[in-house]
Image: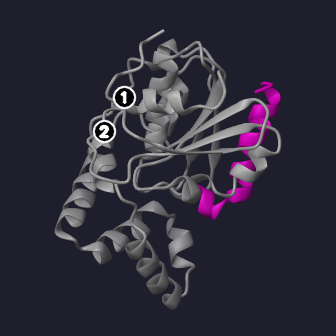
Amino acid sequence: MTNISAQRPALTTEIHGSGPGIVLAHGGGGRIESNFGTLIPLLAQGHTVTASSYPADDTVLDLDSLADALVEAAATERFTIIGFSLGTAVAVRAAARHPERVRGLVLAAGIARPDNRLRLALDLWRSLLASGDRDSFARFVLASAFSPAFVNGMAAADVAATVDQIAAGIPGGTAAQAALIGTVDTTADLAGITVPTLAVSASEDLLVDPANHRYLAEHIPGAAFAEIKAGHVFMAEQPDAWHDLVLDFLDRHGL
């Protein structure tokens, strides 16, 4: 067992339901509600769900301490981690550092380490946030985090309203989370993962190239792979497909 790091970021945690443990690891610039809000009630029908939000300020984050904090916040001794985007790296590092506690992994739209396109996107995120240009940040998020079909299918008024909604609701801590994404590297952890794992790819992802999603499945021994035809924020585009994949995986493995 790896010792819990002394300097852990402070998380805000809610517990839902009862039964076998589930821990949620959200994405950068996201929230528990936006990433998992529709999934939590379904999970809580038969599981104890630990839903922790990352710091909503400029706390500098590192992967080890964030993974340790997520593990320490867990309401059950053992649990499956469901991670989205940045949360997949947090989940893998938690499993590598605390193998006696992690029973399974669901890694959705994830990365082992950022490629050049993602680094460029993160640079733009941080620049726009630093300048206070929330409107341009929101426009970039809408254009890159959802599939072309989803965005092009919106009415013009809905596009404008969604931009305003994103700009008004940028979570605190987004810049710090973007900085962390730029530094993560779990490639050395993957071969040592021995728990049941499902890697879920968003096949129309413009933000995190789907090759990154496939990399996780190809380098974790025995990992299953599934695709959802949607952009990065696939839970907004195809919630039913996402719910079915997660619940079926948990049921098949008794998690």
Q: Does residue 30 appear in this view?
A: yes
Residue that numbered label 2 is attached to: 61
- Whole-number angstrom distance, CA of label 2 to CA of label 1: 7 Å
Instruction: Name the kind of residue labelled 2 in the image.
Output: Leu
Nearest the viewer among 107 and 27 is 27
Callout 2–callout 1 Cβ contact below 8 Å: yes
Q: Residue visible at 37% across and 54% down?
A: 56
Quarter of the image that includes the C terminus: top right
First to last magenta residue range: 234-255
Q: Residue visible at 72% across and 37% down?
A: 48
* Residue 254 among those drawn in magenta: yes
Here the colouring is one colour
Please state if 198 lies on the left or on the right of 208 as rendered.
Answer: right
Within 10 Å of disc 1 (Cα), the crowding (few <14, some 14-19, many 20+) is some
* Residue 123 among those drawn in magenta: no
Residue that numbered label 1 is attached to: 65
Please state if 91 lies on the left or on the right of 178 as rendered.
Answer: right
Please state if 59 lies on the left or on the right of 197 as rendered.
Answer: left
Query: Callout 1: helix, strand or loop?
Result: helix
Q: Position of residue 225 (x, y in %)?
A: 63, 34
Q: Position of residue 206 (x, y in %)?
A: 43, 57
